[in-house]
Image (tube, rainbow, N blue to C red):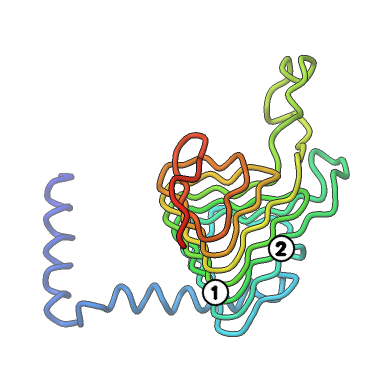
Amino acid sequence: MKTIFKYIFETIGYIISWMTPNDLPELWRANISHIYTGFLHRHFGSFGHNSLIAYKANKLKGLEYINIGCNTQISKGVLLTAWKEYNGENIGNPEIIIGDNCTIRDFCHITAINSIRIGNNLLTGTNVLITDNSHGANSREEMNLNPSLRKPYSKGPVVIGDNVWLGNNVCVMPGVSIGDGAVVGANSIVTHDVPSYSIAAGIPAKEIKQIK
């Protein structure tokens, strides 16, 4: 029976494909995303002209502490979280600032209890993490707690300059600055500052080339 229904639905899809343009699914997703953006944008601290957040985000938290510039595209499945409280306790004054003309790809995770400032023209790959915090300060006492119950702790703000490119699966950790024009290779974990106009890669990420 399952095979019969599968055949019927695939046949219906095949027939519809001859009746509609190939880009109809993409047009449909784009229109849904514009409706989704219209519903969400007033909840942000600010949301610039011609910016878009695609349907649908994985998790959104503390949008009033998140500011998005103009012409910035945020793809599906993202997590954008600014935590002022955690488990009923006040933990900070978070801010996330994302500049103009940024492209943040699918399933990226940007989370702050302190400050994350991203300049203009950021390009990310998929599954990128940018965080200014971790669960707990790694004390012996905290290690005996469920990680989800540990109070979030920040080692410092994150600053990402203009025209930065972060490859797929990059993790940008707390207290890090990435300079203008820097490129960070895929699968890298950034635990120290990356100079402007440099290429960095690895675990932990290290500067491998300076662009003159």
What number is the disc on residue 203? none
Left or right: 137 with respect to 1? right
Residue drawn at (50%, 50%) of the image: 128
Q: What residue is rendered at 60% in x and 59% in y?
A: 179
Mark 1 Cα-neighbour bin, 10 Å: few <14, some 14–19, many ≥20? many
Q: Position of residue 159 (x, y in %)?
A: 67, 56
Q: Quadrant of the N terminus?
A: top left
| Residue 58 vertical placement versus 43 (above, below) | above
Residue farthest to the right, as pictured? 90
- Select label 1 or label 2 by which is in front: 1
Q: Mark 2 is on which residue type?
A: Leu
Residue furthest to the bottom in view is 49
Q: Looking at the picture, does residue 57 appear above or below residue 51?
A: above
Which comes before the other along the chain, label 1 or label 2? 2
**How many numbered circles are shown?**
2
Write down the quadrant of residue 19 in the picture.
bottom left
Q: Is residue 85 above or below residue 38?
A: above
**Residue 199: x %, y % from top left:** 45, 52
Give the x, y percent position of residue 59: 59, 53
Residue at the disc numbered 2: 63
Residue 74 at x, y percent in the picture: 51, 66
In the shown orientation, is residue 182 left or right of residue 4? right
Residue beneath label 1, please?
Answer: 72
Amino acid type, label 1: Thr
Q: Give whichever of 10, 130 is nearer the camera.
A: 130
Label 1 to label 2: alpha-carbon separation? 16 Å
